[in-house]
Structures are given as C-alpha cells and as structure tokens.
Amino acid sequence: MDDIKVNQNPKLGSLDRPNSYIGRSLPRENAKKHLDGGGQFVDDLTLPRMVHVAFLRSPFAHAEIKSINTNNAKKSDGVVDVFTAKEIDEVCKPWIGNLGHLGEMRSPEQTPLAKKIARWQGEPVAVVIADSRAQAEDALELIEVDWAEKEAQVDMETALDSNAVVIHLELGNNLFWTRTVNQGDVEKAFKEADAVVETTLDFARHTGVTLESRGIVADWNKAENKMTIYHNGQAPHMMQHIIAKHLDLNEGLVRIVSRDVGGSFGIKVHVYPDEMAVTAISKKIGRPVKFIADRLESFTTDIHARCHKISGKLGVDKNGKILAMEIDDLSGIGPFSMYPRTSAIETNQVLNLSGAPYVIPNYKAVGTVVFQNKTPMCQYRAVGHPIAVAITEALIDKAAYKIDMDIDKIRKINFIPDNAYPNKCPSGVPLEDLSHEASMDKLLEIMDIKEIEVQKEEDFKKGVLTGHGVISMCEVTNPSPLFYGVGGAHISSQDGAAIRLEGSGAIHLSSSITEQGQGTEAIMKQIAADQLGVKMESVRVTLGDTDATPYGGGTWASRGAGIGGEAVLKAARKLKDNILNIAAAIMQTDKDTLDIEDNNIIRKNGGEGISLQKLAETVYYRGHELPKGTNAELLATASFLIEGIPFVFTNSAMGCQVSIDQDTGIIKINKFWAVEDCGTQINPKLVEEQIRGGVIQGIGGALFEECVYDDQGNMQNATMADYLVPMAYEMPDIIVDHVTTNSGRSIIGAKGAGEAGTGGAPAVIMNAVNNALKQVNAEVVSQPITPEKILKAIGKI
Amino acid sequence: MKAADFSYHEVVNLQDAIKIKAQDDEAVILAGGQSLLPALNMRLSSPTCLIDISKISGLNEIKIDGQTLFIGALATHSDVMNNKTVKDNMPCMIDILKMVAHPAIRNKGTHGGSIAYGDPAAELPALAVATNAEIIVSGQNGERSINAKEFYLGLFETAINQDEIVVGIKYPLLKQGQKIVFDEVCRRHGDYAMAGLIANIMGSKNDIKDLKLVFFATGDKPDVADKTARLYLDNGYDYDKLKNSLSSEIDFAGDLNSSSEMKLHLATVLIKKVLSKLEN
C-alpha cells in the first residue's frame, strides 16, 4: 500500500496513536488488483482435463417430461456425456428446504435435475458435458424432450384458491409456510383510535444481478478421495458441509475455495441445483467440471426476491401516538423453498421488523408464503426490510396526513427513546443500542427540511410535483445461532481468526469471513494492524479457503465486521500478549513496560527496543537463546459469536426529495440523505460505500427492477437490456452521515452496515413520491413505481 | 450464451463483401456488432455466414458532398459525435447520438449499422426519415440511393436487397431557418426510448412554416405523422386533438416498458416538449 494517507495530527482519542487504523478511511489494496484486471475469479481457472457443461432448462413454467432422448446429443462434437436426473441422482441425494425452528415448513424434496415434472421456466432438466461450453450448447439443441405442458400457477394471489393448480400434488395445496404474531389486542386498540389508516402495497419480484454470475469448478480427486470446489459463494464452510452430505463424502476431504467474488448480495449463499449437478458430475466422471451461469441463466435461476403483497392498518390517537398496527403479508416463492436457509425468512423478517423503530403496544402480523411456478425466491440483500419498512412508513405518513401532523414529528413522538434500550420490536424481537431519535435529528439537520418545503410550493406553482419523505428503520445484522443454527441448518454463526508472526516479521491473518468485493480484506487488515501495532502493509490476509482458514459462517447478513472483525481483534490481542511476553523475557523486563509500535517492541519509558523481525528470528531460528520454559507461541486464534439475542440491530434514518414530470411520469430523485448508526466504523469510506451501494439497489427496487412474467410464467425480460438496474445517470447525490452507538456485545462495537440502504430506500422514495402526488390527490402503491403507474395514478392515461 | 457455428469472412474491399453476400442468402454483415453479437450469443439468430466489413478502408468517411452531409457506413457513433464537419453542419445529430446507449457501445456501433438494422426504437432511422436523407447502398449492379422513408418497410424490414450493403447516408444540409429538434422519454438514460420524436421545422417558434414529425419507438418503423403536423400548424397544441390524430395515424405497439396507450400519450406530449425547445 503506497497510497495510505494517515492523518499526521489525529485528534480523536482512539486514533491518537501510531498504527491507529480502526476508524480511518484507508484505501483498500485489493481495489488496485481489480482495476488492474488481476482478480482471480472462478472463470479465470482452467484445470487440466477440465470439461464444461450446459444445462437444458425447462422452457415451460410447468410441464411434464414424458421422455428425454439424449442419443443425438451424445454424438455431437466434443461431447463427453449427457446426463438426466437418473444419472445425477445416483451420486447426489435430494434435499429439502425446510428448517425446524419457525413452525411447519412444507417444501418437498428437490433434486439437481427435474424428474418427471419441471416446475419453473429455467429449471435444469438435463446436462451436456463437453470439451467447451459452445460444444455443450450445440448439443443441447439435439436433446429431444417430449414435453406435456401443464397449466402453471403463476399468480401468488390465487395460489391458495380451491381451483388453483397444485404444484406438489402430495401437499394437497400450495401453502409453504404461515406465521402469525399477536401482541396485545389490536381490535380493541383500533376501536379506541382517533384515526385509523390503511393501505395495501405491492412489491414486484426482482433479483440481485451480481456483476460476476454464479460459477463453480468441481474437481474430484479419486486418488485422495478429495473434492475440491472453486466456488464464488459467500459461505464456504456451509457449502463444504452440504456437498459432503449430499454426495456422501468425508466432510474433512471437501475443500471449498472462494477467491475473488464479483458481488453476491445474498444471491450466492444458497444451494443451487445446477451447482450440485456440477459437483455430482465431477464425482461421476472423475474430471474437473466448470459451470459459469450466463446472464440468461442468472435471470431465470438466481434466486429472486421480494414478490410481496402486504396490507397494513395503523391506529393513532389524536396526538399522533400509535396505538396499534396490523399487517397481512402474502409472498410467492416459486416451486421450492431454497436450501438450506429456506424461503420463509423474508416473510419472517417482514413480521419481525414492521414497526420496529416505534412503540406500538398492540401488533398483529400474519404472513403467508405460497408456491408458484416461477423462479425460486429467497434471501437477497436486506431480507424483508424493504417490505417491512415501506408498509410501516407508508402507514405513518398516512396517519400524519390524516391528523395533520408533520411527518417528522409523528415519528419522533413514537420512537422507542434512545435511552430506553434494551427494548423490543412490536413483534417482540429484542433490540439494543439504537438511536432513532438522534439519527432523525441528524437527518433533519442535514436535509434542511424547511427549505425543501419552500421549494415544493414554488415547484408546484411551476407545474412540477416535488415531494419529500423521511423514514426510520432497524436493520438486521450480525445474526446469532438463533437465526439458522437453532433450526437445524449447518451454518456457523461463530467465526474464527488465526494470526501469526512469521520469521520475516510479517503478519499473516486468516479469517472465516469472505470477501465479495465489499472490502472485507481491508478492514480485517486494519483491525489486525491496529491491535498489534504494526504497519498495514506488513499484514497479509487469507480468506475463502476451507483448507486454510478457521471454521466459520462467511459473509452474509452484514456479519463480517461485527463478528469476524471481533474475532480478528481478539486473536490480534492474544498474539500481541504472546509477543510481549516473549519480548519481556528477551529484554529482561516487565511485560507491562512494553508495547508494539510500527513493528517494533518499544519500552514505554524509553530505551532501546527490538523489532518484531528480530523477535521472530530469535523465536524461530535461535530458540535456544530464550529462557527455558518461555511460551514462544507466535500463532494466536480466537472465535466470536453473538450470544443471547437473535441479531445485533443497526438503525438508520433516510430522507429523499423527488420531482415528478406530470407529462411523462418520470421520477427524478433530486437528493438522498442517509444517517446510519452502525456503531464503530472500521473504515468509514467502506461503510459509506455499503450505504450508497445499498441505496442504489433500493432505488432499483423502488423505481426500476422487476422480473416481468407473462401469464404462462415465462420471464419476459431476462437480459441486461430489458431488466433495468439503475446506472450512473440514475444515481442521485447520496449524502451519508452517522450517529455512533456502539454495540455492547463486542469490544469492537461494530454493527453491520450492508442492509439499510436497500431496506430503506424503497420506503422513503415511495413516501416522497406520494408526498408529491398528494398535491394532485393521487397515490402509488406498487413497486417498481414506473412512469406508466405514475401517469395512471394522476389520470393522464 | 455461445454463438452457434458460422463461417466468418473478413473482407478488405466492398466488392468481396457484395460477392459473398450475393452468393449466400443467410450471410449477414458484421460491422460494429453491437446488436448482432448479442443476438448470436443468445442464439436468437443463427446465420451461417458473417461478413466482417469493419476492415474495409474508406467506408468511415464523413464529408460534405454537394448539398449533403455524407456519413460513411462504418463511421462509429463516437466518430460522428467528435467530427467537426458534423458539428458545424448538423449539430443536432451529436445531441441525438448522446442518447444512443453508452460510450462503450458508441465506440463500436456504426452509423450504417444502425441505419441498416432499422430498429424501430432507434434514433438514427427516425433522423434519416425526418431529414429526408438518402441511404446509399452498393450491390452487384453498382450503387443506388434509397430515400429513407422508402427504406423502412416494416419491423426490421428494409428495402435493401440481399446482395446490397449500406455504404453511407446523405443528409441534406439544413437550409436557412430550418431546425431539427428532438426529445425522447426513456426509463433510464441510454435505453431505447418509450417514445421519441424528431421534428424537422422550417421557421421560428411563433411562425412555423413547415413541420415534419417523425416518431420512434412507437410502431414498427419510424412513424411519420404528417396529418398531426398539419393539425398542429393549424390549431397549435391541443392535447386531445393531437392525441386523436396520432392514434389514427400511427399503429402504436406496446412493449415491456410502455403500453400502446402510454406510447400514444408520450408521443402527444412530446410534440409539446419538442416544440417548446424552439427559440423565437
């Protein structure tokens, strides 16, 4: 790192010392590698004797496979073999995407390739193995399938009707999961309320659109009985367990390597049928097998998210105090619940998180999750948050309008006060260390809401509809074992770090947290260097290799900094302690008089010290010089997990201002503000990247992104030209600010910061749009808010 | 997403290209490849033969030719946008090209390719029709010139013969008092429009002597709306009347981002938006 600019005159206490890297916006070294084109992604890997696969995918949303003839395909140039479910099932056992801790889930067995019936357009049915992907695709065209197309259950809203098409006959209907939360007495409270408001919101399906598509190379080594998987996933140890379990392998002999990963957003934390098939093929044919999803496959087989219709009702007294909230959420998840995390979690989070920032004494929430013939749906960035936040904040704005109260005031009088934590969500989920009051105050300060209101009136006179909104939200981060593990999933909630001083004086750190482009490696380095007292450039980091890193969960649910970072901090402190003990022995002084600064052991009271390199040389090469019995351990390990609560929550307040062209229905986000309280920021620049990136994905959900299906269940826009993600021109100025309330669960005090933008932006944009539309007595209730929806709402078409 | 096999001919002169194209009914011209290559990779199209004309020299010339601005078929959008002759003689073309996709695509995509492909949502075919441009094609029987309005026959269908290749476009130079004004409505910057309008105007804001309206992303080809233009000249901007007129004159075809009803509405308001850009 030759570009680090460390403030020479740091003012803050914790930053006021050498090697104080925690809290600094340092550039991340691996960005340079990627700009250089030097990353190592799965598709960069070529192994000797490697073959490629292409999947024949169901062209129908629902169809019986009466027969498959692969004879001609097998004769095609370069083809090694063609498999159907029969061959794959010989080596890979089916799975079931249900967990035990959230009540009955009803997803049936799923196999890598569809047997007898295909249940979504894109479901893999057969696979060609060939010398090149192009040859495999050529042969796909020669596979003859006798399809009998069946009526598809596309619409989630009719999925439970008596005349619905039942997707899994053995279940009798299309219900996957349902949950009811009931706190207090909502009926009574609504009767006592001075004003009751209601709304129903629709959220279209969208997806994660990672820059690098899903990819895997599976390499079965028969001689060693070892399976090596190069995979661009988020949870290597989870995959290690799953692959061993379903392919009947010794788990210790399954190695998962996840080097550079080009974005994940929760898309790459699930078990995909095609990837399991690839692993099975390698086992079967004894050769390395590569599969890289193309963009068409990404759109029809990467998990989708959202797809909710939610009704809500809020009762307030005449002073604006919330008395009760009730929601009823319906979600469609495709034909299977994803394995192993299940597709119940998004709805579960909607129920958990609605109303979370506020005191709501009476709360009722019903969630219903149904099967349908569309691409499977599961957890994507900010799981459930956009729905929970949008329904809560839409209802609060409505209540404010109804009793004629300012939108910021109604929130402030209902917040759980900052000094009232620990506390609970209306749903009963525990909360601690949050700051809605301080965050909203800061937001209003940076937004200058008075000026915005003046401008709104002036714009209206000119025929421009301008509106604004503010919201508050809770963000689920740093999950504990109560998230998945308790339900029977082998997903580690504990993470580990191992840190060592090497003979050269270099520090090597390995962590079970993974890097998907967000800068994990950089913050791990910052923590280690900061805690040890060494220069950043002397720390080398290894991530994403189950043979080389400690065991742990990986990176998802914004857990890297708060859980993995704490493990690194603890390991670094242990190593420092060991080093100082050894140094005390060498320097014949009391350990407490020593410290480490800039890779040197110094005497706090002055006098000559020794370098870490010298110390390491003594330990490794001239150990006989050490006093007998010295504990010369230069490798330290530590683990960390969140205990006692399900999640460490972060909170955020957001505001935005939009203008609407009444002729075209085009919405322009003029400005966006976000105040985040994620506790300690290890690298503020990376936190802001997380928030801005999250907001952009939230803008996608609010205004652009939608997996469009026709009524037969065919996805209509599975290309980057037709599926609209926000691009540079669609990105407004995003002003980010912070309130800092450290998590009391760890020394480092960091909470997650990856979800808020995506979770909150859809709500605040919708509120701002409706604030603008209110001037012409119109409203939109469906996302993405397209120009056509705006024009319909204002009666132009 | 790998293209099916095809034969590939890299030609260095026009005659070779014409010869191969004449011999093979399925031969397709490859210039910038910005529309063709994605279609091949998605196997939406599987021609047996590609003729790569990008190495033919001289086909990217931009010059004044008599009373016209000539743009060679192989000039990329970026070439055109950065060309002084274009800037001096038809600056509106630069503004229009800024709405064509993004720089990476404009660096490869060619002027002739866009004209020949004839995407009904693309800007350049509509510009050619609005300006009464001539499309110069070359074939076994030599060169001929086709008026842009006659060039576009239907959805991706043009008057070009199998043995012919677009070699350039001749845009008549603007006369004194003549202006080309345009606007379009897109979901995102650089996307194909939900509706777009190029107006060819003679006169000034308060004294329009002649008006030609050409819409794109509305129907199956650039849509000329002469009756509606006449109505505007007679009555000024009357939303309902113009909308009625447009609905009788253009067969609006909805797409993923806008229904036919939406397109009709946008086309109508585009008349106001475009003409309000005129200066007095």
Image (cartoon, coloured by chain):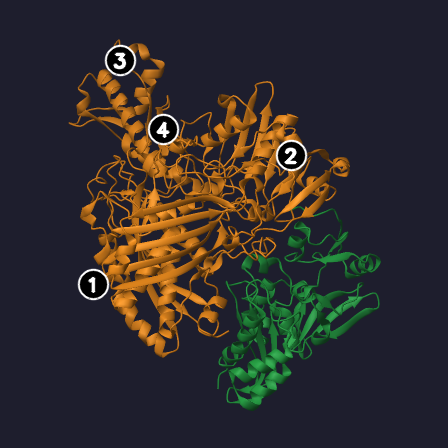
Chain colours: A orange, B green
Label 4 vs label 3, nearer the camera: 4
Could you say whether the residue bearing mark 3 is in a helix, strand or loop? loop
- Which residue corresponds to mark 3? A630
The amino acid beneath tag 3 is: Thr
Residues at discs 1 and 3 in contact (Cβ within 8 Å): no
Residue B149 placement, left or right of A795: right
Task: For marks 4 and 1, give the CA distance.
Answer: 52 Å
Q: Earlier in the sequence, mark 4 or mark 3?
A: 4
Q: Earlier in the sequence, mark 4 or mark 2?
A: 2
Q: Nearer the viewer, residue B96 or A461?
A: A461
The amino acid beneath tag 2 is: Ala
Q: Tell me, yes or no, whether dots 2 and 3 are on the same chain.
A: yes
- Which residue corresponds to mark 2? A85
Q: Earlier in the sequence, mark 4 or mark 1?
A: 1
- Which residue corresponds to mark 1? A319
Q: Earlier in the sequence, mark 2 or mark 3?
A: 2
- Which residue corresponds to mark 4? A497
